[in-house]
Amino acid sequence: MLIPCPECERSVSDRAPTCPGCGFPIAAHVAELAATAELDRDRTTREVTGEVDCQGCEARGFTHGADGFAWCRTCEHTGRVLLCRSTRGYFAVARLHVDRFLAGERDDGDPIVVFLGTEPPAAHRYPAAGRRVVEDD
Ligand SMILES: [Zn+2]
Ligand SMILES: [Zn+2]
C-alpha cells in the first residue's frame, strides 16, 4: 500500500523503512499509526468482565513497606479491582476510575489502570482480601 510521506508528501510504500525522497522513518510512522488505530479499537470495546487481584497491594488491601503501613487506595482496602477486557487484552482497573476507563478517557500507565496482557488472568493469585494467612512453623 502507498501512503503519503508525512514529511515530503511523496507516495511511498508503507513497507519502506524510510522515505526514499527525504529519509523520513516510514516504518516507525506506520507502526505509530497502527498503534493509534489499535488504541481507538481498544477504547471503544472496553467492558467489565469480573474482578481481579489488586496488583498494588497484592490483594491484601494494604501495603507495608519502607513508609510503614498504609491502606491501599487503588482497591479501596478490598484487595480486588475490576477486570476489564477490550480488543487489546485485559486490564485491572480501580473501581473509582472505571467509568472514565470505559469511556476511553483513561488508559493504562498508572496504578489505577494496569494492562495485564492478552491472556485472561489466572484465578486469584493471592489469598482473598481480609483473610489472614498463618504460616506453620
Ligand atoms: Zn519523504
Ligand atoms: Zn490494593
Image (spheres, rainbow, N blue to C red):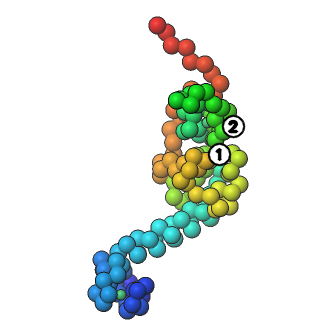
On whether ligand 2 comes within 8 Å of the CB at mark 2, the answer is yes
Q: Is residue 36 left or right of residue 83?
A: left
- Tell me if mark 1 has few (under 14), some (14-19) or many (20+) residues whose alpha carbon lies within 10 angstroms of its own: many
Question: Badge 2: few (under 14), some or many (20 or more) residues near its Cα, within 10 Å?
Answer: some
Ligand 2 contact, mark 1 (Cβ < 8 Å): no
When asked about the image quadrant of residue 87, the answer is bottom right
The image quadrant where one finds ligand 2 is top right
Which amino acid, mark 2? Glu
Name the residue at the top extreme. 137
> Can residue 93 be spotted in the picture?
yes
Q: Quadrant of residue 46?
A: bottom right
User: What residue is drawn where x is 41% and y is 71%?
Assistant: 31
Residue 37 % position (x, y): 51, 71
The mark found on residue 94 in the picture is: 1
- Upstream in sequence: badge 1 or badge 2: 2
Question: Which residue is at a point 60% across and 19% down the rendered structure image?
Answer: 132
Marks 1 and 2 sit apart, C-alpha to C-alpha, by 8 Å
Proximity of marks 1 and 2: CB atoms separated by less than 8 Å: yes
Helix, strand or loop under label 2: loop
Rendered location of residue 3, percent (x, y): 41, 86
- Residue 91 visible in the current orientation: no
Of 22 and 60, nearer the camera is: 22
Along the line of sight, the residue nearer the viewer: 60 or 72: 72
Q: Label 1 amino acid?
A: Ala
Q: Position of residue 29 (x, y in %)?
A: 41, 75
> In this picture, is 137 found above or below 42?
above
Residue at image point 54% right, 65% down:
39
Q: Position of residue 44 (x, y in %)?
A: 62, 64
Give the number of the disc on residue 16.
none
Identify the residue under disc 2.
Answer: 76
Residue lying furthest front in this view?
Answer: 67
Q: Nearer the viewer, residue 33 or 25?
A: 25
